[in-house]
Amino acid sequence: RSRSGAVPAHRSRNILEQVLEPGGSLGGRDLQYKHPEGYQTFEYAAGWRIENPMLFLRYSAEMEHLRSSLRELRSAGADIPKMKVRRALWEATRLLPAELDTELNETMLVHGTAPERVLQIITQGFNERFAGRGLFGQGVYYAEDVAKTDQYVTPDRDYRENKEGESDPLYDLHRLLYGDEKSHPKDVFYVFICRVLLGAPARTKDATTQLDNPGASVWSAGVTDPGEGRELAKMPKSSTGEPFHSLIAELGGRVVRFREFVSFHGEVRAYPEYLIAYRRVAPRLP
């Protein structure tokens, strides 16, 4: 198959429900959509496995590029630590039918977004060129806790019956995922479960300097404002001057509650494996 699609993930429902179990507190100052009733947890509404052969082909080609790059770095004496994600997420996603290449620091992470962006990610993948300013640069951000990604989602309220304008991403998305109005669960939010190639990452706590090489910048020469950074610094052991493959914002410093994982080549170093539609669950009345 060459076309992209979304296949209902009925058999994986129990696993996807585990991914929706938040590890940290909900809400916060970055919350894009403030729920009118408040909420305490999440409820699974629907899930799909994404099938996009062209995207996966690009992703697989990048895996081979990173394999060669990491082989060279290790032979030059570089110490590339194995990355570990939050145990609860690892425990849940390891049950999914996806073999991860730990030598490439391939991990399962989550990414929340607005419903208007979902179809674009399914069909075209991630693209940091559309990203705005961020605390850790203009890349694609991933997390290891849905409590973090929930800060950046907005609701998909109702089934879009009629197309609005020449290009209507919600109209097309609803036909891909639901088919008809009766199948739309209403008032849902979306989060992707993604395979992400972290490779040899730079780590930071302040968005400016490397944690493993104190005093060295995480950014390429010429970047003076971390919020506008688009290219990471060159890896010290790379003979070709290749930049770090990803950026990890560790807890401490400017990161208080959740680690963040940033890719500046999201179109080839991440693949949207699953999509979950979920609801925010308001507390019971006293």
Image (cartoon, grey):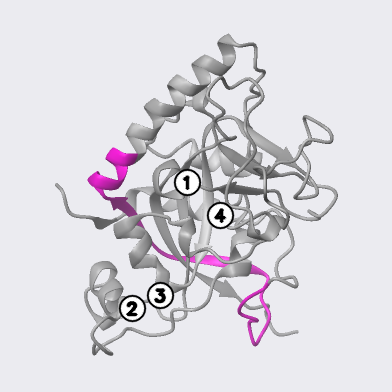
Amino acid type of disc 1? Answer: His
Name the foreground residue: 253 vs 114: 253
**Of the numbered discs in the image, which one, if any, rests on residue 212?**
none
- Earlier in the chain: of badge 1 and badge 3, it is 3
Numbered disc in front, either 1 or 3? 1
**Of the numbered discs in the image, which one, if any, rests on residue 170?**
2
Magenta highlight on residue 213: no
Give the distance between the C-alpha atoms of the residues marked 2 and 4, in whole angstroms.
Answer: 24 Å
- Earlier in the chain: of badge 3 and badge 4, it is 3
Name the foreground residue: 221 vs 172: 221
Amino acid type of disc 3? Answer: Glu
Is the residue under label 3 in contact with that under label 1 (CB below 8 Å)? no
Residue 226, quarter of picture: bottom right
Residue 181, quarter of picture: bottom left
Q: Secondary structure at mark 1?
A: loop
Amino acid type of disc 2? Answer: Leu
- For the C terminus, the quadrant is bottom right
Numbered disc in front, either 2 or 1? 1
Residue 179 position within the rendered picture, expressed as x and y whole percent measured from the top left: 22, 74
**Of the numbered discs in the image, which one, if any, rests on residue 139?**
4
Q: Is 166 rendered above or below residue 6?
A: below
Residue 117, quarter of picture: bottom left
Q: Secondary structure at mark 3?
A: helix
